[in-house]
Image (cartoon, grey):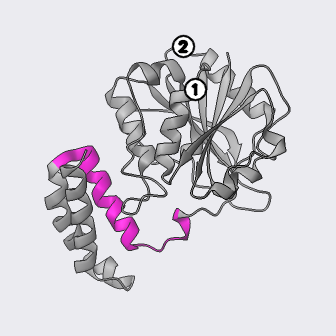
Amino acid sequence: MKINILVSTIDKGIFALDELLLAPREDVSYIISHQYTSPEFLAVPDHLHRKDVLVSRMEGRGVTRSRNNAIRLAHADIGVFADDDVVYKWEWLDMLKQTFEADDALDVAIFKIKTLPGEPEYREYPAESIEYTAAPSVGTIQLAFRVDRVKERNLAFDERFGAGQKLLIGSDEQIFLHDCIRAGLRVKYFPEYLVQHPFQSTVKALTKYDDRLNRVTGGLDARMNGWVALPKAFLGTIKYAGDIFKHGKNPVSYFMHRFYAALYILITK
């Protein structure tokens, strides 16, 4: 069983991948989907000149575009989503292989993120394995999948969501899992570490009821539940009005951002 580590990075991030790459091993290879916004970032660093590394260039922004490009290029048995600030260990990748080898019906696996020494857990994790019938909220770097089964069903990330998009900066992972489950794939969580990443992240830096988060709430609701997301934007505003005020935000603004994002998803493809 072979693994593709599917790395999404942008601009100078390609120069920071030396800690991500492990020593060459026949069963692991790397596909680096590199987005660039200027020709100055087109040079390939020396440490990427390896036979187990493929660099694919894309002009522009949008991490979901990058991840879809990596899925398209994936050719191994298992694909693992990665960013340019993560670290792997051989024992974690060996655990990953053993997990899929032990259950041929497993299509998508969700694992834990290990933080740096002295940092708290990245999030609160369930202690036991869980098989999902509804998509959970996770980080993309927690996910691994059988490449052939995802490709057979033409599954991909919704490119209206994700980092680098102007309107909807998150929830792309949950939507991907939602689509996998709807397509009949078996999605299961395992209480094992797969990857290391610092505790802090872009989304964690946002305050509660940040306009960007409000838009993601509306967009995610519409993507998963359809037109009911429009009245839910109004009802949700009423429900959370007190807490919105408590956090120094305007309920009218909350409603407008949530409603507009839901409408955008409903009228676009």
Q: Rate crowding at label 1 as few (under 14), some (14 to 19) or many (20 or more) other CA atoms within 10 Å.
A: many
- Looking at the image, is 179 positioned above or below residue 43? above
Q: Rate crowding at label 2 as few (under 14), some (14 to 19) or many (20 or more) other CA atoms within 10 Å.
A: few
Dominant secondary structure (helix, strand or loop) of the stretch shown in magenta? helix
Q: Position of residue 111 (x, y in %)?
A: 60, 38
**Looking at the rendering, which quadrant does residue 153 occupy?**
top left
| Image side of residue 197 versus residue 203, left or right | right
- In terms of depth relative to the viewer, which is nearer, 121 or 8? 8
- Residue located at (58% from left, 55% from top): 123
- Looking at the image, is 203 positioned above or below residue 107? below
Q: Quadrant of the N terminus?
A: top right
- Residue located at (20% from left, 64% from top): 233
The amino acid marked with disc number 1 is: Ala
The residue that mark 1 highlights is 74
Secondary structure, mark 1, is loop
User: Where are the magenta residues, as a range?
Assistant: 203-226
Q: Quadrant of the C terminus?
A: top left
Lower position in the chain sequence, tag 2 or tag 1 = 1
The residue that mark 2 highlights is 104
